[in-house]
Amino acid sequence: MAKAFSHINGNPMFYFPSRLNPNRPFPVLLPFNKPFRVTMSCNQSYWASVSQDIEAHLKQAIPIREPLTVFEPMHRLMFAAPRNAAPALCVAACELVGGHRNQALPTASAIHVVYAASFFHEHLPLTESSRPKSKVEHVYAPSMELQIGDAMIPFGLELLSQSDDPTQNNSDRILHVMVEITRAIGSRGMIHGQFYQVEPHESDNNESSHMEQIERVSEKYEGTMYGCAAACGAIIGGGSEEEIERMRKYGSYIGKIEGIVNRSGSMDKDLMRRMVGELRDLASNELRWFNKAKVEAMLNSQFGSID
Amino acid sequence: MAKAFSHINGNPMFYFPSRLNPNRPFPVLLPFNKPFRVTMSCNQSYWASVSQDIEAHLKQAIPIREPLTVFEPMHRLMFAAPRNAAPALCVAACELVGGHRNQALPTASAIHVVYAASFFHEHLPLTESSRPKSKVEHVYAPSMELQIGDAMIPFGLELLSQSDDPTQNNSDRILHVMVEITRAIGSRGMIHGQFYQVEPHESDNNESSHMEQIERVSEKYEGTMYGCAAACGAIIGGGSEEEIERMRKYGSYIGKIEGIVNRSGSMDKDLMRRMVGELRDLASNELRWFNKAKVEAMLNSQFGSID
């Protein structure tokens, strides 16, 4: 678990237990290239317990079952995929609006699973010389990894649908969350971010253009994923329209920060600080709208600084 | 539209307006290798009108919109994908259980879209020498086609979610259909069929083993897809549990026939006739459970024969 916390200017923000993924195709993504760490303390025990509960739920929800030829590799790859903070954000958002953690765990798990699908497809070996060579170790043949990724998306949604409980009359929330997740992974969200990555872009040597590129990929990819995760948590926890939209905005700023920081290895540090600082302020503004005591109980926030 | 009808021994069966796909990697799939045609007449105008309505709905439901970099290729590939009979079966099942055609069109369109995703991923050029070379013409770079396929699945589900109408109180049916579709395309359905295709199988030269291989791929791939389509039509049309399950079985027999016939080019014709005949009887048995007049109004069936 990385020690990257986020809190600045007295505005508490969720800790996001980001584990950097050393395998993304961007050379700037390697942890040792990371230009700075945001070091602040918050209630680590809260986030650790959320992460533990998500892992436990994943283990229980993703058994190896028949057909073994499909489930064994799917199981292996789902747990091999790097973790990010979106599932934990989902759970936190649920609890923040008054929901119970157990309500959010299937959604949080589904978010990890669809992210895992996206991760393995991004690293699939294709017959395309311009595609950056992936450093991810391939355990299975490409056609298997392609199909496992294809199987993960419906499996993630299946996890979610299993939490549909007629006695709780929660079908509308589950449907809402399914729509949110399918939109987020799709053509106006994460896939759009991935398109930005593969489409040819001019002036690669121009720093501001490179920064813009990083910014828009991060906004669409991590921004949409985290925004969706936070919104889904609020939906499943029974939040109001306003709470859902505030959580979505909050999550999308946090996701964008995550994306920018992970992709920014060789970038100008001042530009980076300014950009991340602005996003952090925007995110904090959204949190102000929520119950301060609740936010702080989760965060146990203290002042911190950027190294 | 192919002239393949299905009806035998006086048991009426739906016409399935199968358009053979000449591009599937199986060499036995080429239409000119098809060992026999099932030639029977039925109410072609019914099926033609269903197909027209589905095409019209697809055109209206899949506009080219922002972001154009994603939607233009997605639009192009969705319409370039071959058509199969599953969407029409969905509409027919809806009408058979007393639903209105318009209720089923978003589901039928979603089924085409997720099939298109599966089709393009199956033909993706991967760095794997053992994968059969696809004859599909690639308009876009492999990484684009991979991502477009990835975007199609959520887009198909989005089409479906847009038909959620609170005034009609149909959220539970939409959710049910989403779960059906995600299960069908996943690890225990179509993907499982595709795994059977890529996993190494011994005794390729052994005819009965080859036939078994074709049978299990067809049962899982087309069988699950068509069974899902028919069940979804019955769900969205307000059918009872029994009607839904009968339609699912009916669809899965029809789908399996479709798969076997398409893959059977060099197979023993007698074995094929026997196998298809048995499946057809099983399918007919399911239809007997429904209102005979309604079935016949759709089919206007007459006796026919196998060439």
Image: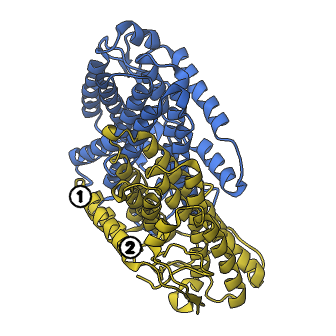
Chain colours: A blue, B yellow
Q: Where is residue A306 in the image (x, y as percent from the top left)?
A: 36, 21
> Of A203 and B18, which appears nearest the observer?
B18
For the image shown, how many numbered marks are present on the structure?
2
Q: Quadrant of the C terminus of chain A?
A: top left
Look at the picture and state if B261 lies above or below B298. Answer: below
- Residue underneath mark 2: B46
How dense is the environment of label 2, judged by Cα within 10 Å: few (below 14), some, or many (20 and up)?
A: some
Asked which secondary structure carries label 2, the reply is helix
Tell me the number on the disc at residue A192.
none
- Residue underneath mark 1: B68
**Is residue B81 something one can see in this rendering?**
yes
Badge 2 and badge 1 in a common chain: yes
Q: Is residue A95 left or right of residue B61?
A: right
User: What residue is shown at x 43% (from left), y 32% (from top)?
Assistant: A173
How dense is the environment of label 1, judged by Cα within 10 Å: few (below 14), some, or many (20 and up)?
A: few
Name the N-terminal-most of marks 2 and 1: 2
Q: Where is residue B126 in the image (x, y as percent from the top left)?
A: 52, 68
Q: Position of residue B134 (x, y in %)?
A: 50, 78
**Is residue B146 something one can see in this rendering?**
no
Q: Where is residue A3 in the image (x, y as percent from the top left)?
A: 49, 24
- Please identify, in this view, whether the residue under mark 2 or under mark 1 is nearer the observer: 2
User: What residue is shown at x 53% (from left), y 34% (from top)?
Assistant: A164
> Of B301 and B1, which appears nearest the observer?
B301
Give me the chain letter of mark 2: B
Which residue type carries mark 1?
Answer: Leu
Look at the picture and state if B86 lies above or below B188. Answer: below
Q: In this view, does A220 lie to the left or right of B236?
A: left
Marks 2 and 1 sit apart, C-alpha to C-alpha, by 36 Å
Which residue type carries mark 2?
Answer: Tyr
Asked which secondary structure carries label 1, the reply is helix
Give me the chain letter of mark 1: B
> Of B113 and A18, which appears nearest the observer?
B113
